């Protein structure tokens, strides 16, 4: 396992490479445009000359500086206006002569002043807790294709409402969670059998918040505990080991998918409590999805974990496996039509 310093160094090198690449692309772009519109090259040279003259101003007598500066500024403005006009006439955006950054916030440096940019935090997180899978999933799964028709509209005797009504309620609660994020500091516990859309809802929320610029860490319970174990029991001497899991606490939203499917030990129980507790102290949200009913959670983990989870908003999923419906195209509507 590479140390955190190594990972940061590696990533900052990637940013350097990225900027070098972008600068090379800009040079190529400029060359191509200047060949087509030679006046633009002259303008750039003239602007560079004006820059040198401006720098030399300080060497002049104070009385002359103000007037000379004014003249230089006017000349500069005229050249810039002319350049803009030439580009416009050629149907080009003024941006073609500028650097094109992946992240405009930090201009691909990873930092805004001394503060790490969101894009840097995400890269670190991606590196430590492989998130590439998540990006793939959330491409397909988002609120736009939340299909309520997959849920039956027959009222469940046990629950008193139909799975579809229930799914509508869950959809509303999930949208409210996104809307009130992060101020509400709300936590969600999604529970119910496999194949009812829990992971789907997690992905929808993750996608929305990632697009809004939040740092979202999305892990299956198995991944999460494996990583924590790796960190805690690493034999390597790493002075930063204590800070290794700071990303887990630092993320704006932590999603733990499929809690209860991992191999539960004393270690996982105490780590889970520590995590939930630390995030609560920082007023940072957690979403947990699980197949376990609340009483099973108490059995598998501890009363301490259960007491933390009591503060979570519970969204219970029930009904038939919607993945089967999707796969075989047996829309429930068709079914109820025939019966
Ligand atoms: Zn950035």
Image (cartoon, helix red, strand yellow):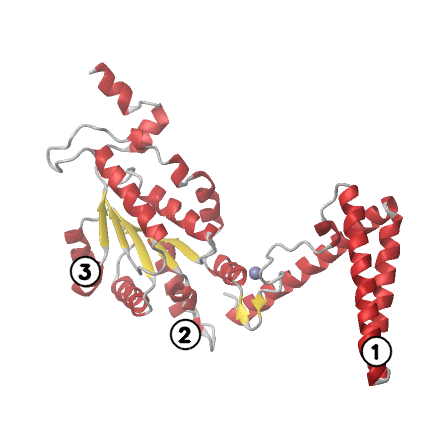
Picture residue at 46% right of the left edge, 75% below the top = 240
Nearest the viewer among 168 and 297 is 168
Nearest the viewer among 84 and 21 is 84
Task: Return the x and y of residue 77 as percentages of the image width and height.
Answer: 78, 61
Q: Quadrant of residue 17?
A: bottom right
Measured in 3D between alpha carbons, the distance from the residue under mark 1 to the one under mark 3, in whole angstroms, is 71 Å
Q: Is mark 3 within 8 Å of ligand 1?
A: no
Mark 3 and mark 1 in contact (Cβ < 8 Å)? no
> 225 above or below 36?
below
Q: Quadrant of ligand 1?
A: bottom right
Mark 3 sits on what residue? Answer: 306
Label of residue 57 in the image: 1
Kindly tell me whether residue 261 is visible in this rendering. Answer: no
Q: Earlier in the sequence, mark 1 or mark 2?
A: 1
Q: Earlier in the sequence, mark 3 or mark 2?
A: 2
Task: Return the x and y of residue 114 as percentages of the image width and height.
Answer: 56, 73
Mark 2 sits on what residue? Answer: 242
Q: Secondary structure at mark 3?
A: helix
Q: Earlier in the sequence, mark 1 or mark 3?
A: 1
Mark 2: few/some/many CA within 10 Å (<14, 14-19, 20+): few
In-image side of 135 versus 224 (left or right): right
Task: Return the x and y of residue 268 as percentages of the image width and height.
Answer: 29, 62
Mark 2 and mark 1 in contact (Cβ < 8 Å)? no
Q: Is mark 2 within 8 Å of ligand 1?
A: no
Picture residue at 72% right of the left edge, 55% below the top = 98
Residue furthest out toward the left: 157
């Amino acid at each position: 396992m590479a140390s955190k310093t190594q990972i940061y160094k590696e990533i900052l090198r990637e940013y350097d490479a990225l900027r070098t690449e972008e600068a090379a692309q800009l040079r190529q772009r400029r060359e191509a445009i200047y060949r087509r519109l030679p006046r633009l090259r002259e303008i750039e040279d003239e602007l560079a000359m004006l820059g040198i003259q401006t720098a030399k101003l300080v060497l002049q007598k104070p009385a002359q500086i103000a007037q000379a500066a004014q003249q230089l500024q006017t000349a500069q403005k005229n050249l810039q206006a002319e350049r803009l006009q030439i580009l416009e006439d050629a149907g080009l955006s003024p941006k073609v002569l500028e650097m094109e950054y992946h992240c405009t916030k930090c201009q691909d440096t990873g930092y805004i002043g001394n503060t790490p940019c969101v894009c840097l935090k995400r890269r670190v997180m991606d590196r430590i807790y492989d998130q590439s899978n998540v990006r793939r999933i959330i491409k397909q799964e988002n609120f736009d294709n939340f299909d309520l028709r997959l849920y039956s509209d027959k009222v469940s005797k046990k629950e008193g409402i139909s799975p579809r009504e229930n799914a509508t309620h869950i959809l509303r609660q999930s949208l409210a969670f996104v809307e009130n994020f992060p101020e509400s500091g709300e936590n969600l516990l999604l529970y119910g059998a496999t194949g009812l859309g829990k992971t789907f809802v997690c992905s929808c929320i993750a996608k929305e918040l990632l697009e809004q610029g939040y740092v979202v860490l999305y892990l299956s319970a198995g991944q999460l505990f494996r990583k924590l174990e790796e960190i805690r029991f690493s034999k390597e001497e790493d002075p930063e080991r204590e800070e290794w899991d700071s990303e887990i606490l630092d993320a704006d939203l932590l999603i733990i998918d499929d809690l209860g499917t991992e191999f539960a030990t004393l270690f996982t129980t105490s780590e889970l409590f520590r995590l939930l507790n630390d995030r609560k102290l920082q007023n940072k949200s957690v979403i947990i999805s699980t197949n376990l009913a609340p009483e099973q959670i108490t059995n598998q983990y501890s009363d301490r974990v259960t007491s933390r989870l009591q503060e979570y908003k519970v969204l219970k999923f029930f009904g038939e496996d919607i993945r089967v419906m999707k796969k075989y195209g047996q829309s429930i509507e068709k079914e109820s039509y025939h019966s």
